[in-house]
């Protein structure tokens, strides 16, 4: 188990972010890996967080099991599988900072386009090709840095799904993606007894904040929820770009 207090200075806020994210505020969860990556290499940080994510996924999937959109999952999950496979093949060859910059740039461009568009916000239909493409980008960036949220939201947020349907669809998509990471992360040697025991120690905090996130989603009005979602995408995208340009791991 990691005992360095400096690690927990980053890990505790990261786990809090994950709990709120899995409760339904998906954007804030993107802060988790960048925060943990200030101490650990990004792929190792992603592997340390994975057991926590899977436990939170189980809670969230049960809670939102009746609220999800089958069409989006049908078109996005095959793309995600392709994207994750590409990430597995390129894990040792692609710069972590390049991935952060790519994800951050996608998020900023998406929010800027949404906010600069004139007229009332109307639901936009998406195509199967769009779902496959953005599912693939999401799978790739999720595999590399747990940063699959902005590409996923590029496809889903403009559809203006019912609030709980959006949350449930997001929950099930990333629950499946996270489960599929287990084998590749083992093959890449990213799991260790020290990191796993650290994940277990952080799990109670993650579960508590998961339920706080679920409660917040239930009481937040739909329009406010969507505004918060866009702001979170922007904030996290800026963090990713900052880290891609300036930061490095502090854990040795």
Image (cartoon, helix red, strand yellow):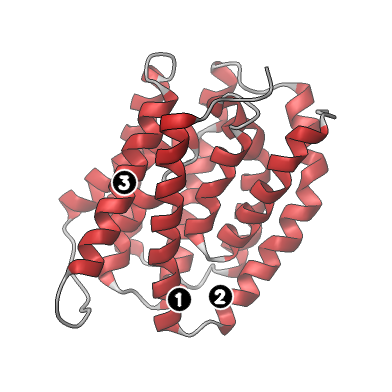
Q: On the image, numbered disc 1 is attached to which residue?
A: 225
Which residue shows up at 66% across the image and 33% down it?
A: 48
Q: 112 or 218: nearer the eye?
A: 112
Structural distance between the alpha carbons of marks 2 and 1: 8 Å
Q: On the image, numbered disc 3 is attached to which residue?
A: 135
Q: Nearer the viewer, mark 2 or mark 1?
A: 1
Q: Nearer the viewer, mark 2 or mark 3?
A: 2
Q: On the image, numbered disc 2 is attached to which residue?
A: 217
Element type at marker 2?
Answer: helix
- Mark closer to the chain start, 2 or 3: 3
Whether residue 41 can be seen here? yes
Element type at marker 3?
Answer: helix
Structural distance between the alpha carbons of marks 2 and 3: 24 Å
Q: Quadrant of residue 93?
A: top left
Element type at marker 1?
Answer: helix
Placement of the C terminus among the 4 image quadrants: top right
Which residue shows up at 55% across the image and 69% down it?
A: 64
Which residue shows up at 61% across the image and 62% down it?
A: 20
Q: Crowdedness of circle 2 by 10 Å Cα count: few (<14), some, many (20+)?
A: some
Q: 130 or 63: nearer the eye?
A: 130
Give percent across and percent down for residue 14: 64, 47
In the displayed orientation, state which residue is furthest to the front.
246
- Mark closer to the chain start, 3 or 1: 3
Give percent across and percent down for residue 18: 61, 53
Placement of the N terminus among the 4 image quadrants: top right
Vertical arrangement, residue 149 with respect to residue 81, above or below: below
- Contact between labelled residues 1 and 2, with CB atoms less than 8 Å apart: yes
């Amino acid at each position: 188990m990691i005992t360095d207090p400096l690690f927990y200075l980053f890990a505790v806020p990261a786990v809090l972010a994950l709990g709120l994210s899995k409760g339904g505020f998906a954007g804030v969860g993107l802060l988790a890996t960048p925060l943990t990556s200030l101490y650990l290499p990004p792929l190792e940080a992603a592997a340390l967080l994975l057991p926590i994510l899977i436990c939170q996924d189980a809670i969230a999937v049960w809670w939102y099991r009746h609220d999800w959109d089958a069409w989006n999952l049908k078109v996005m999950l095959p793309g995600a599988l392709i994207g994750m496979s590409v990430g597995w093949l390129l894990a040792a060859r692609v710069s972590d900072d390049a991935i952060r910059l790519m994800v951050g740039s996608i998020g900023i461009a998406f929010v800027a386009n949404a906010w600069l568009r004139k007229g009332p916000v109307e639901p936009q239909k998406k195509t199967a090709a769009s779902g496959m493409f953005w599912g693939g980008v999401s799978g790739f960036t999720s595999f590399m840095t747990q940063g699959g949220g902005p590409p996923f939201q590029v496809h889903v947020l403009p559809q203006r799904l019912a609030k709980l349907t959006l949350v449930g669809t997001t929950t099930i998509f990333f629950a499946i993606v996270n489960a599929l990471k287990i084998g590749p992360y083992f093959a890449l040697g990213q799991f260790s007894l020290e990191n796993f025991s650290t994940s277990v120690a952080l799990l109670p905090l993650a579960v508590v904040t998961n339920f706080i996130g679920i409660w917040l989603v239930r009481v937040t009005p739909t329009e406010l929820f969507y505004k918060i979602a866009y702001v979170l995408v922007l904030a996290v995208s800026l963090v990713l770009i900052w880290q891609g340009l300036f930061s490095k791991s502090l854990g040795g």
